[in-house]
Image (tube, rainbow, N blue to C red):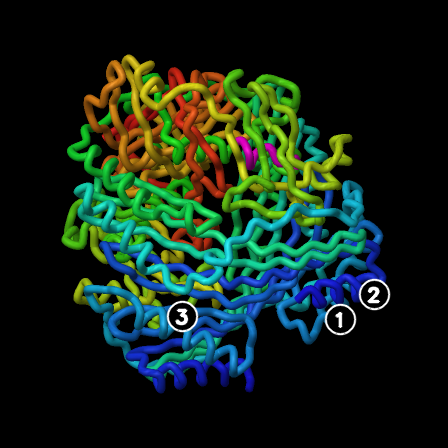
Amino acid sequence: MSDPDLVDYAVEYAQSKGAAYAEARYEHQVEESFTLKNGVLDALGLTEDAGIGVRVLANGSLGFAATNFLTKGEIKAVVDSALRSAKGAKRKDPIVFAPEPAVVSNWSVPESRKLANVPVEDKVEEVQHIDRELVDLNYKMPARFFALNTIRITKYFANSEGSKIRSYSPRVRFWYFLTLMKDSDVEQCYRNYGWAGGWEALKEWRTLDKTLEEARTAWNALDHGTKSPEGRMDLVAGPQVAGIASHESCGHPTEADRVLGREASQAGKSFISPESVGMKVGSPVVNVVDDPTVEHAIAFYLYDDEGVRARRRYLYKDGIVNEFLQNRETAAVLGTKSNGAARATNYDREAIVRMANTFVEPKDWSVEEMIEDVKHGIYMKSFMEWNIDDKRYNGKYVGREAYLIENGEVKGPVRKTVVELTTPAFWSAVDAVGKDLEFEAGWCGKSDPGQPLDAAMGGPTIRLRNVSLR
Amino acid sequence: MEDHAEKIVKAGLELGAQDVVAEIVTDRSYQVRFAQNQPVIANEWRKSIGQVFLAYDRRVVVGQVTDFSKIRETVGKLVKVAKVSQENPEYAGLAKGPFKYSRANLDRKVLALTDGSDYVEAAINGALEEGAKECAGSFWRYHTEHFLHTSNGAEGHDVRARLYLSIRALVSLESSGHGVSCASRRSQFEPESAGHKAGRIAVLAKNPNSGKEGKYDIVFDPLIFGSLVDQVGGRSSAYFVQAGFSPFLKKLGKKVASEAVTIWDDGAADTIGARRFDDEGVPTKRKAIVQNGVLKTYLHNTSTAKKFKTKTTGNAGLIAPHPHALLVKPGDWTRDELFGEVKDGLWLTNTWYTRYQSFVSGDFSTIPRDGIFRIRNGEIVETWKDIRLTDNLIELWKRVEGLSKKTEQVTWWGEVGVPTIAPYALIRKVGITRSAM
């Protein structure tokens, strides 16, 4: 039996054994990766993984089982296992799924230069070239760490309602982490690039120029940086900062499974309740969206892992909570439809509600226009330390590259600007949104067992008025 | 499966590699997740993966075999890639076997367990009896079997079977508590106690007020103290030190904690992190990472050990060494005595989202969650919310005043990734900040 046939068989067999709903997902992931540490290629990684995960709904409960033994007998065993778990669950409130039409589709992400055709030596050389140029800057850098990863994901999804969806997603990631020291003073910086597509990613990213620029700004901070001023002032926050704030304080709190308590024990709950649609959390210029259909953003997809069509979701619209990220289970509880947010890291994980590409929707301000109107403030282009509480209300972003603004002009570098604000305090202070939309890749963590998943986060530069900084 | 490991090594050597390690891992784990006081899904896994490490003229490749009918073909691809790769001058070979291993500590009653719903129910009921309204968490029966074979003579077999339950109990969104139970034997597993603890903390944490910034003497519950221990254990990996992810660069032999602090890594101890050998086949054993406040060693595999002119500590990771299980030497205080020492401070029970401004300097913050309690003269006088612990990792450890005699085994999602035996701890003058409105 071929792998897709096994998927179809799993669904049919589950139905024959009494599943009210069944789905099976085959994934084949081919991954190449390496790390370059202080100029040394530690190891090349070459992994290939394939398997099938089966999820069933029976007696109002869910069971999931997965295997990488791709035989008919084994598929039968995992279906039996998932059904046994579901039927044996002592659940009071039956789980139901919001209705969806059956979909038959075959989609793929275009690769201008196919990842499979790029020799591994070329991939290594691309990164080593950056490393050599960094060394030539002659800064004291006790640690230089790079990671490059390419992955090709082939999927086939089928469910008992007639959906049959095939897909192919190639993705590229590049990540660096640099340590610069002057005497005993240290600056560390990182950047995380992600791309859905082929090897053309490297040209699009301009990684050499940007990495060298990052090192120069870190050295400049060590050389000339002063303590960031404390008090209430304006903050002009670059795309990286807007992106992380979008992800942490807009995307996560609007995940419907979190709102409903399904993730309460691990990833936490949300300051947003099921009744919060319409609640004000930001100024009227704030639109934060999550959109899986942004071309080449790393979390691009057309159908989610429940077979639901992807679309743009306005999480905060005009500063108001507008929509949650939903899968079919949460949508049924909340009396709505799924908006295609169900994803899993691989065949061996259940699909749960996830962000894809989350960002502040751009408007029409230039960065110069935002700065020229600031009497006293900080221009924070990037951050290092960040965190937020599990209800997504108390966030913190500490500046990496940041500058003082005085009377509309950018002055010298300031160090470790601390933006420690509640979610409404952050978004309500935004009075200008730029047009310079940029994305950065991230690993979004959620669920148990953990499912660290590709996500993009981004935005244009935004301006916050009169916020408390230190 | 043992045959597969041997076949992978044989194929690698025949195809030209000088060093080969194969570890076949068969996973038969089972989990029940629960939320809102009822199960939400049960998961089961039936997987076998052959993890492969090989070196060809010091060119290192890692990969995996998932289709065991294609061992030679898959290993061939890896060797081919190795031949076009680059030499790793820091690669120093594999530990030389054969090795003798301690007897496996295996409770077959754990393996025989096929339904965890009674444990889930016991934990939830424990929390509800304390007055909690909503419970969420997960029950795990971990079951993995490991067959290791190396080209340098190591051959090992290990069956790891463990029970784990994690429960968060809530009275409301901002009043919650967390409890865990970890056991390698069914007779030691106490999910109901974990539920009671989570419920008790949640009820105590009712009606919290916003916390205030400052420096406070803090009693750390074992779960949150485990998070701080995890930072020490993980960042003592020689690989992390080299890569810039550690505050322990150039700190060997130096004071990194108060004299009260001794932290061991011990993969041979009876914890749910126990394993008979590391990824090179070296038998696991106890070693002090920090002894009486002094950093004694980084964690090593054969290659990092050579780089640092020492011997492997039995902590391979073939690329990056890592801790297996962390144990804090108990102190001589009772929990009540630690609380009694606090004139004006806090009791913290859990945390998450630990992040650094600089790993090298150790400047970090983490966000306490679940019960946060104000202590005056040893007594709880108020419940807090919305604070952040902002400090420096090494300076914080230097301010450890006392540790309890009683310890608990903890591990938790994200924060305490390595199973840890942790006591209660009193740390002086800990930095607390909060978000501006």
Report x, y in % for residue A227.
44, 19
What numbered label is drawn on residue A302?
A: 3
Q: Nearer the viewer, mark 3 or mark 1?
A: 1
Q: Is residue B169 above or below residue B392?
A: below
The residue lying at 27 percent from left, 55 percent from top is: B121
Report x, y in % for residue B244.
61, 33
Label 1 amino acid?
Arg
Pointer 1: what residue? B72
Marks 2 and 1, how far apart at CA: 9 Å
The residue range painted magenta reads B232-238
Pointer 2: what residue? B15
Marks 3 and 2, how far apart at CA: 43 Å
Report x, y in % for residue A342.
36, 64
Marks 3 and 1, how far apart at CA: 38 Å
Q: Chain of mark 3?
A: A
In this image, A126 relative to A229: left or right? right
Q: Nearer the viewer, mark 3 or mark 2?
A: 2
Secondary element at tag 1: helix
| Residues under numbered marks 2 and 1 in contact, where contact means CB atoms less than 8 Å apart | yes
Q: Chain of mark 1?
A: B
Secondary element at tag 3: loop
Secondary element at tag 2: loop
> Is tag 2's residue or tag 1's residue first in the polypeptide sequence?
2
| Residues under numbered marks 3 and 2 in contact, where contact means CB atoms less than 8 Å apart | no
Label 2 amino acid?
Leu
